[in-house]
Image (spheres, coloured by chain):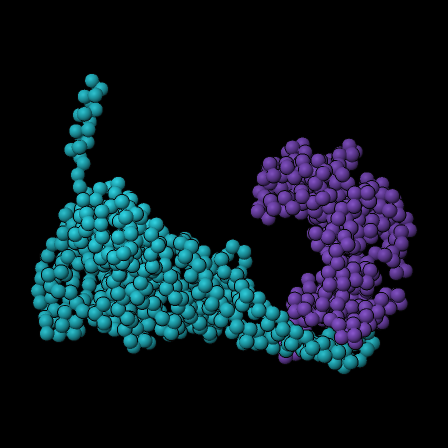
Chain colours: A purple, B cyan
Amino acid sequence: MQKIKQKLIELGQQLVRQIEKKQNPTVSLPVRSLSNVHYNKKIGTLELGKNMASRQFFNVAHTKKFLQTIEVANVSKKLLDLGKTTSLRDVYYQIKRTIPGTKINVCDEQTETDKAIEDLEVITGFSREQLHINANKNGSVSGRVIIEDKGDTIDWSKMGSGGWSIPSNVEDITFKKVQAKYVLYMEKAAVWERLHEDKFWDKHQCIILSSQGQTTRGIRRLLQRLAEEHNLPIYVLTDFDPWGHYIYSVIKYGSISLAHISDKMAIPQVKYLGILAKDIEEYDLKKHFISLNDKDISRIKQISDYDWFKDKKIWQKEFEAMKKYKSKAEIQALSSKGITFISDKYLPEKIKKQDWID
Amino acid sequence: MAKKEYETKAEEMGALQRDISISEFFTKNRHLLGFDSPKKALMMSVKEAVDNSLDACEEAGILPDIYVEISQVNEDRYKLIVEDNGPGIIKEQIPNIFGKLLYGSKFHRLKMSRGQQGIGISASILYGQLTTGKNAHIISKISPKHPAQYYELHLDTKYNQPKIVSEKEVYFNRESGTRVEFELEAKYQKGKQSVDEYLKETALSNPHARLSFKDPSGEMMTFPRVVHEEPKQAKEIKPHPYGIELGILIRMLHSTQARSVKSFLQEDFSRISSSVAAEICTRASISALSRPSTIVRDQAEKLYKALQETKLMAPPTDCLVPIGDDALQKGMKKEIDAEFFVSITRPPAVYRGNPFQIEVGIAYGGNLDKEETIRVIRFANRVPLLYQQGACASTRALLDTNWKSYYVNQSKGNLPYGPLVIVIHMVSVWVPFTSEAKEAIANYDEIIKEMKLALQDCGRKVASYIRKTVKVREQKERASLLYSYIKELSRSLGELAHTSPDQIENGLIHYLEKKLPLVHERGENAENKTETD
């Protein structure tokens, strides 16, 4: 912790030295966009390239971002001083104010401070959690697992109907007992609730895990630790649409905006269980199709062009099928076969047949 | 057998072949003359009438005072009244001028006038008659001593002749002038390419005219006179040999009054002296004394070639009457809400033997939109050109000008954008239009070059204004913004780095103050670059 604080202070002092030397205060940081993100085929994850950008205070196009970067660094340093942790939302409110004598706010949207925090991560080399800033907890997990978190022992099989809520920071939990053959991650909380009610994790000796929408860092890190520390295979279940496919992509390869922490997040051995194009035929899901809109179509094009999907024939086939059908399908389409169809038939069959793609 | 059938068919067809009167042709092809939509038909009709009035006033040396009224008769029918204080028209000519297509004084002369454009007021009246079945009503008065003459006219489309339905002497509330009234199928709309826009732009290019307009809702709009001197009279000139075609030469040879080819060349063209005429005859192997009407086609072709090959002085340019940069600026100032105006009138130049002159004015800043593509207002002989901007030589000239060096934003291949209105005016005895609708100036290199030179001249002045006032203003705004940021940064950076905020603030202010003159210097360099362009 002292090391992290020292790094932040040093960032400030470096700028002060530049000012003393009558230079334009400048912070350099790696470019965080697709143009500077490369797919490392050997390791199987995304990584940040070497392109650097300079953020200068006396460049009207950078001034505001520059101030935001220093502001979040200062908030983080204060948190470390106090030994407290706060949320992304809180950081936004601590920084948000109108600059006196102007109509300009230091930040207008939370996305601006969120980005500034990500920038601070690449500048300092420390993660958001190490900087004592957390996202909201998000997602539920259940299974025959016992963990210890801040001195409390928690049994994931005895968490009632809601399961255990996954915190933003899972660095400090320790696994006491893990009785599972695999981990099943799904995009939809509603599907998780179905499986949890059916005690799927108990019947099939597995861990089931979901988020609501985006896969947060906490969930990705938890999945990674289960995969690495307990050698569990991870299967991903999403909608048959480009957004679902990207959720899988993020879990497996890492995300474009967070390519700098792929090593702490990405899980190259993850497999994609469904919904696959062939499931549509096999389980007769066509009548539950939803037409693709323009956004979907351009997203398919984008994803199929990503370096890490470009040469994967099996994935290009999925994209082609979607374009051919001009439609997408949700996981919940399976419910039309009966509410427990997914837990009684679809999942056990697929896992038994090892019917997934990589 | 087959041959006989052929003949019969030809005879059959021959029976159907006959003269087509111009009026009949017009009936079927009104779009060629610009009457392609009810909205455009209304604008064209106003334009024809107002152009006529302005031309007549100019020729008579009268400061124009023109009244336009449009009222709605029913859903798609409007009544148009245009009244002027011009010299009036003598009684005998009224039916011909308003009731016969292609009748007039302008087509046969090489003289700068508005009326070169469009087919004339009679076409509008014919359009009105075709779409409503109503007759036109004309009143004209030539002096306070004469009574005003009223005519109700009907156009006989088959024979292109006016038919007088009724005529009488009436009272007319002006010393002299003309009033036209007719109904037409039309649509009245404000905005782009509307009557309003045409009148506004006409007011800009005719600052010596007073225009008033009563629109269908009854609202009155007045465009005041800001120049109180009538424009100089345009002189008529004879054609310059470089500007004619072989067909025209042959026609001229047949219709000339001259008794010999030599005197024909001397008298019917400009810039041909007696010795040059003799030289041309020798070059064309034609006897200088032969009668022009005896020249056969082959000889005419030789003569044409000889004319093009002989080195001649450029045509005289006293036939051109530009608005003048001062009057143009006055016109712009009253019709455009901006903070800075420049204008320039280029010296006369020549394309294909036709003298012409380019004027450009630029309005900058004020309430003009900063984010929009600039507005371009085009004129030919003071007449606004509202259609086909893309095909116009002015667009080429605008695109070929490097606006960035004048601090005006431009993305590649597009018109610049920013708070600018650019006025481009071409005056000529013969404006080369790209088509019969006469809405775009043809892309002659000489014309584009003159336009570019004028644009660059005005552009440099705008740049200098931007540098001196706008850049300084923006710089001040930027500096004051940065001062506010400095305070905020000093506080948080001071906390982060355990340093006194005052120390940081002083350092940053020092940098800012040192840097400001640097920005200025960069501006100066940009100027030097444009000056050498």
* Residue A270 in picture, x, y percent from top left: 79, 43
Which residue is at the far top?
B1
Q: Nearer the viewer, residue A108 or B202?
A: B202
Q: Where residue A346 sits: x, y (%)?
A: 72, 36
Residue A34 appearing in the image: yes
B118 is higher (above) or lower (below) than B298: below
Of residues A110 and B293, the one nearer the viewer is: B293
Specify the quadrant of the image occupied by residue B452.
bottom left
Left or right: where B432 falls relative to B500: left
Query: For this view, does B397 lie left or right of residue A155?
Result: left
Q: Residue at left 37%, top 56%?
A: B351
| Residue drawn where x is 21% and y is 54% of the image | B263
Residue B112 pos. (x, y %): 28, 62
Does A223 sit above or below residue B365?
above
- Tell me which residue sits at (63%, 78%) in the image: B480
Q: Is residue A72 visible?
A: no
Q: Position of residue B57 (x, y in %)?
A: 23, 69
**Nearer to me, A248 or A73:** A73
Q: How many marks?
A: 0
Q: Image check: A147 left or right of A286?
A: right
Compared with B292, A25 (above or below) is: below
At x 41% / y 69%, what residue is drawn? B344
Task: Judge whether B92 appears above or below A40 on screen.
Answer: below
Assign the N terminus of chain B to one quadrant of the image. Answer: top left
